[in-house]
Amino acid sequence: MKKTFFLLLAISWQVVAQEAKFSNPIAPVTNIELTVPKEVKPIFDYWLRDTYIMLGPDGTYYLTGTTAMPNRVFPNGNIHCWDYNDGLYMWKSKDLKNWTPMGLIWSFEKDAADWQKQGKPIKEGAKSLNNDPLEGQYRALWAPELHYIKSQKKWMIVTCINGGAGSFILESISGKPEGPYKNIAGNTTKPIYGNIDASLFEDDNGEVYVVAHNHFIAKMNKDLSDLDEPYQKIKETPYNPEPYIEGVFMTKHHGKYILIQTVWSVRTGENEFTYLPVDKKTGNALHSYDVVIAEADSPYGPFNERYPAILQGGHNNLFVDKKGDWWSTTFFNPRGEMGKEFKITCRPGLVPVKWVNNKLQPDHARAKKFYGHK
């Protein structure tokens, strides 16, 4: 009787596993067509991560990202911002090739609210993921995004602070992209989201959402001063088990909501790679920092299976240029096996992309043309 019971239990679990729907975890890192083209190089020389670019209504491209503090002397000479920086810098361009610095447009010293200025102490001897010595306090502005909200003609920035301080949203009080900026009411005394890497998305009907690290979403109220609802978990088709995911961004294409996320691939064998969590016991190493995409009929989901779109192009955003061509940003992440192939890392970069059968991938032909290769 007991044997029959356990046999039936085992069969039932197998049926459940077969019926459960998960995204394909195989990482196709040997696929050159899906890899950042070899021609892609930094568009200018400035240490920066999490590159973000958008086209404004004035016909100007604006660029932001995570920066280090200028003129800071680093103990081992390696530039980083794992502990602190001074705020948000911006650049502009008319052609995506020639960039003009706009300087520090938001600073902790002059513009931050009390809770944003506080910082968090660093334990003695602490080091970054790249083994950089950390000093001072955790108080760095990370992953800033500049958004022009068309329905309200407002310039807004969404960004976050490290050390567990959370994400917040700023609004330009001058009507210009360079600000000055003030906190919206929803985050004057606390973060609007308690984790890093929040993003903004404006739908065709003018509704604006906070898409939050990395599986949550909430609609904002009509004047964009606060949230209009609690955060909801986005309905997704996950990996099994789900790994750490970051770099969330949402846009629309072919009438679908496009959810963009970044996942590390991990080597599991000779030319075999997965997006499943790192197995620390076997010592499997991070390989590439990849963009994966899913689509849905609603910003809340359910989103279908994720597919790999841009290998080694993670924590990106998509935008459309003046000609209607699509682009993805990148920053040449130095971590992982593929990161070692970059001659220069942590610099702003651009990857021409295209939609093939409504799936995104790098456009190698446009990359050769843009970067001057025949």
Image: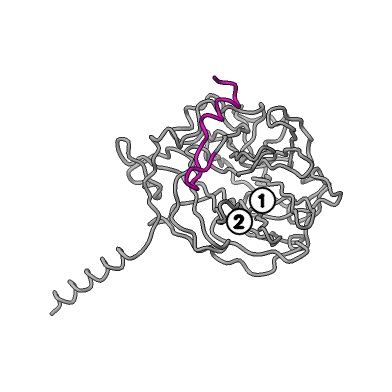
Which x, y percent locates residue 317? 60, 44
Is 243 on the left or on the right of 134, as rendered? left
Q: Which mark is residue 26?
A: none
Can residue 356 be found in the magenta stretch?
Answer: yes
Which x, y percent locates residue 71? 73, 29
Mark-to-mark CA distance, 1 and 2: 8 Å
Amino acid type of disc 2? Asn
Question: Dividing the image into 4 quarters, which one contains the N terminus?
Answer: bottom left
Q: Is residue 66 visible?
A: no
Q: Is 302 above or below relative to 354?
A: below
Circles 1, 2 touching at the beta carbon (< 8 Å)? yes
Q: Which residue is mark 1?
A: 160
Q: Is residue 374 visible?
A: yes
Q: Which mark is residue 195?
A: 2
Please name whichever residue, 77 or 167, is drawn nearer the observer in this view of the structure. 167
Disc 1 is placed on an element classified as: strand
Which x, y percent locates residue 153? 80, 53
Can residue 345 be found in the magenta stretch?
Answer: no
Amino acid type of disc 1? Cys
Please name whichever residue, 258 or 223, is drawn nearer the observer in this view of the structure. 258
Q: Few, some or many C-alpha atoms within 10 Å of disc 1 (few <14, some 14-19, many ≥20)? A: many
Residue placed at 65% from the left, 46% from the top?
A: 138
Question: Dividing the image into 4 quarters, which one contains the C terminus?
Answer: top right
Residue placed at 66% from the left, 70% from the top?
A: 229
Q: Is 322 above or below relative to 292?
A: above
Q: Which residues are magenta?
A: 354-374
Disc 2 is placed on an element classified as: loop
